[in-house]
Amino acid sequence: MNEDALIEGCIRQEPSCQKQLFMLYSRKMMTVCLRYARNKADAEDILQDGFVRLFQNIHQFKSEGSFEGWMRRIFVNASLKKYQTKKWNMEQSGMDHLDEGSMDPDVISALSEQEIMHLIDQLPDGYRIVFNMYVIEGYSHKEISEELGINEATSRTQLLKARKQLQHKINRLDLIHERPV
C-alpha cells in the first residue's frame, strides 16, 4: 500500500492502516523521541503520545510537504509537551566559562553517530532540547522560543552553551585517546 492510501486509511480510522503506519515509522519516530527523552521509558511514553496525536490529527495533513516531516514535528511537539507538563526549568547552571578552543575535525569524524548522540544526551535538558531543535530538527530560534515559551536570546544562549559543553566533552575525549597506555 502506498503512503497516500495508508494516510487515507488512517483518516478513515482503519486499524490495519494505523498498524501499518505505526510499523513503518515507529523506529524513526522513536529515534526522535530518544533525542529529547532522558530515558527509554520516557521515550516510549512520548512515542505513544505522538502516535495518538498523529492519528487524531492526520486529517489535517496537506500533501504540500513530506508526510514524514509533518509527522516528525508532531513527535517533537509531543516531546516538548512532556517536559512542559513536568514544569521543566530552562535555567541551567555551570559551564558558563568554558574554554572556547576549537574542536578538531579529525576527532569529530572519528566518533560514531552513536557516540555523538551519547554526548548530546549528557547535556542538561535545556541545552539538549534547544540543540536538538536547532541543529538536528532545523527549527529557527524564533520557532524554538515560541514552542518552549522562552525568548530568542535564551534560545541562542542555550545553543551556545550546548555547543561549548559538547566541545569540552569532545576535547576531553581527544585527550583521553592521546594518553600513552
Image: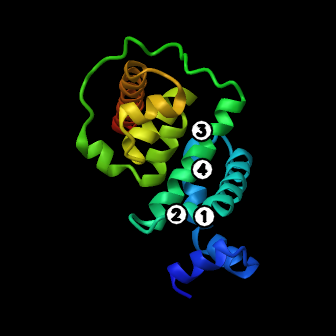
Question: How dense is the environment of label 4, judged by Cα within 10 Å: few (below 14), some, or many (20 and up)?
Answer: many
Which labelled disc corresponds to residue 58?
A: 1
Q: Secondary structure under badge 2? A: loop
Q: Residues within 10 Å of mark 1 (few under 14, many from 20)?
A: many
Return the mark for residue 33.
4
Q: Nearer the viewer, residue 123 or 54?
A: 54
The residue carrying mark 2 is 61
| Three-letter amino acid code at the position of disc 4 | Cys
**Residue 123 % position (x, y):** 52, 31
Q: Is residue 153 left or right of residue 47?
A: left
Q: Amino acid at mark 2?
A: Phe
Check disc 3 and report its element: helix, strand or loop: helix
Among the two numbered marks 4 and 3 on one chain, the one whose residue lies closer to the N terminus: 4
Q: Are marks 1 and 4 in contact (CB under 8 Å)?
A: no
Gap in angstroms between the C-alphas marked 1 and 3: 20 Å
Percent coordinates x, y for residue 131 in the rendering:
43, 36
Distance in Å between CA atoms under marks 2 and 4: 21 Å
Q: Which residue is mark 3?
A: 80
Residue at the image point whose x is 43% and y is 53% from the top:
113
Q: Are marks 3 and 2 in contact (CB under 8 Å)?
A: no
Q: Position of residue 48 (x, y in %)?
A: 72, 56
Question: The C terminus lies in which quarter of the figure?
Answer: top left
Compute the Cα span from label 4 to label 3. 10 Å
Q: How many marks?
A: 4
Query: Mark 3 or mark 1, which is nearer the start of the sequence?
Result: 1
User: Can residue 124 be seen by looking at this rendering?
Assistant: no
Mark 1 and mark 2 in contact? Answer it, CB < 8 Å.
Answer: yes
Does dot 4 land on a helix, a strand or a loop? helix
